[in-house]
Image: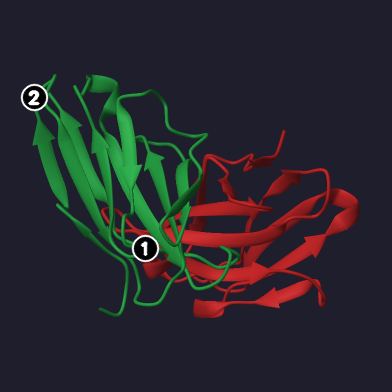
Amino acid sequence: AQSVTQPDIHITVSEGASLELRCNYSYGATPYLFWYVQSPGQGLQLLLKYFSGDTLVQGIKGFEAEFKRSQSSFNLRKPSVHWSDAAEYFCAGARCKLVFGAGTILRVKS
Amino acid sequence: GAGVSQSPRYKVAKRGQDVALRCDPISGHVSLFWYQQALGQGPEFLTYFQNEAQLDKSGLPSDRFFAERPEGSVSTLKIQRTQQEDSAVYLCASSLDSGVTIYFGEGSWLTVV
C-alpha cells in the first residue's frame, strides 16, 4: 500500500537554528513528492515539489528538500528558522492521488 | 477568484442533520479533490473529479457521504445523518492538470454535536 511516514510528531528548534523534518515514503515506484505547510485554522500551502531530475529542490520561504531514492526519503530543510515558521508540516506523495503523512508540528523558541 | 474557495467555513450540525459543503475551484481547473482532516491528523483522501466525472470515490467513509460536480466546476460534498465522528475539516483542492500539483482551500470546519 502507498504510504508516507513522518516519524516526528513534534519538533522544537530555536530561532535561527537549522531545521530538518523527516519524511519517508513507501510506493511501488517513486511518487511525486510534496511538502505542505498548514498554519492553525488555515488551509495547506505548497512549499515545494519533486517530480524528477535534480534531487535537491528549492521551495518558497527559504525551504529546500532532498530526494534520496536509496533511503526512500524526502526530508525538508531550512538553514535558519524564523518564529513565523511555526506551523504543521505535511509530506505527501502522489501517483494518482495525494497521500499525506501524519504531519510534524514545528515549534520555534526565541 | 484567485484561490479555491470553500463555504461555509464553519458549520455546527446536530447529530442526524444533513450538511452540504461547497467548493469553488480555481477557474479552469479540471481536477477537484475532497479530503477529510480529523483533529491532529493528516488529510485523508475522500474523492476525486475530473471535470464532472467522479473518477475515484474510494475514500468516502460510508454511503452517508456523497459528492457531486454536475457542471465540472463547483462541487458539493453532502453528508447525510451526520454523526460525531464526522467532525473534521473538509478540504477541497483543485488542479489544472491531472492532479500533479494541487491547490487547497482553507477548509470547512464541521462540528457535529
Residue at 29% across / 22% down in the picture?
B85
* The furthest residue to the right: A70
- Image colour for chain A is red
Q: Helix or strand or loop: what does disc 2 sit on? A: loop
Quarter of the rendering occupied by the C terminus of chain B = top left
Quarter of the rendering occupied by the N terminus of chain B = bottom left
Tell me, yes or no, whether dots 1 and 2 are on the same chain: yes
Residue at 27% across / 58% down in the picture?
B23
Percent x, y for residue B9?
17, 53
In-image side of A38 versus B58 (left or right): left
Percent x, y for residue A13?
51, 57
In-image side of B49 versus A48 (left or right): left
Residue under numbered circle 1: B72
Mark 2 belongs to which subunit? B
Residue at 17% across / 33% down in the picture?
B111
- Image colour for chain B is green
Going by the numbered disc 1, the residue's amino acid type is Gly
Q: Is residue A107 visible?
A: no
Q: Coloured how?
A: by chain
Residue under numbered circle 2: B14
